[in-house]
Image (cartoon, helix red, strand yellow):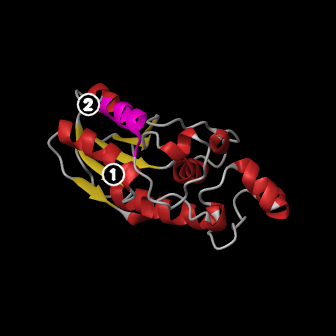
Amino acid sequence: MITRILLIRHGETDWNASGRWQGMADIPLNKTGLEQAAALAEHLKERPISAVYTSDLQRASQTARLIADRHRLTIIEDQRLRESNLGEFQGLTLAEIMERYPKEALQMKQEYMAFIAPNGESRVAVQARVYAAFCDITAKHHPGEVVIISHGGAIRTLLIKMFADNQDAGQSVLSNTSVTIIESDG
């Protein structure tokens, strides 16, 4: 049996639009993000989706609700699908991070997976919790396709875990409401 998972990044927020790092800050979708999510729900309306899992942060759950409503499904929230806890970096732009935390910004670049922002968590920790959620979800043997709505950094760490032999896995650009399809035959 082939299992098909649709990994989807949430729609746009005002912080996305202004280049602010959100992390676990609970920022809602903006007007563009709501339009993106509605367009995605329309695009996916004929897909055989049987379950919709989502991060509990509202930008993800708002995106998930629009897709789930099209399929008459209830969303299933899972905190493990949250974005990285970026600690002191949350709410800042990259330029602000580099100005206020130059040593940490360099360390973040050099130690991509192991780096921990001040009062935050490492990508290794994010990867472990997102992968655990992914394994639990895929173990449930849903018929049809399963949608997982999460966040750019969380999805990227999952792809790095799943495709460790592919050097490009961590370099993927995951735009708002992008869909990454994972198929497994066991």
Q: Which is nearer the eye, 94 or 125?
A: 94
Q: State which quadrant residue 33 falls in.
A: top left
Q: Which is nearer the eye, 21 or 47?
A: 21
Prevailing secondary structure class for the magenta stretch in the rendered image: helix
The three-letter code of the residue at mark 2 reads Arg
Query: Earlier along the polypeptide chain: callout 1 or callout 2?
Result: 2
Residue 168 visible somewhere in the drawing? yes
**Secondary structure under badge 2?**
loop
Residue occupying the far bottom of the picture: 119
Residue 144 visible somewhere in the drawing? no
**Residue 159 magenta-highlighted:** no
Give me the C-alpha separation between circle 1 and circle 2: 19 Å
Residue sitting at x 51%, y 57%: 83
Q: Position of residue 60 (x, y in %)?
A: 39, 50
Along the horizontal axis of the image, is 114 left or right of 120? right
Label 2: which residue?
47
Q: Position of residue 97 (x, y in %)?
A: 74, 56
Q: Position of residue 171 (x, y in %)?
A: 67, 40
Q: Which residues are magenta?
A: 29-38
Mark 1 burial class by Cα count in 10 Å: few <14, some 14-19, many 20+: many
Q: Position of residue 65 (x, y in %)?
A: 26, 46
Mark 2 burial class by Cα count in 10 Å: few <14, some 14-19, many 20+: few
Label 1: which residue?
61
Residue sitting at x 63%, y 64%: 124
Vertical position of residue 37 compared to residue 58: above or below: above
The three-letter code of the residue at mark 1 reads Ser
The quarter in which the N terminus is drawn is top left
Q: State which quadrant residue 99 falls in.
A: bottom right
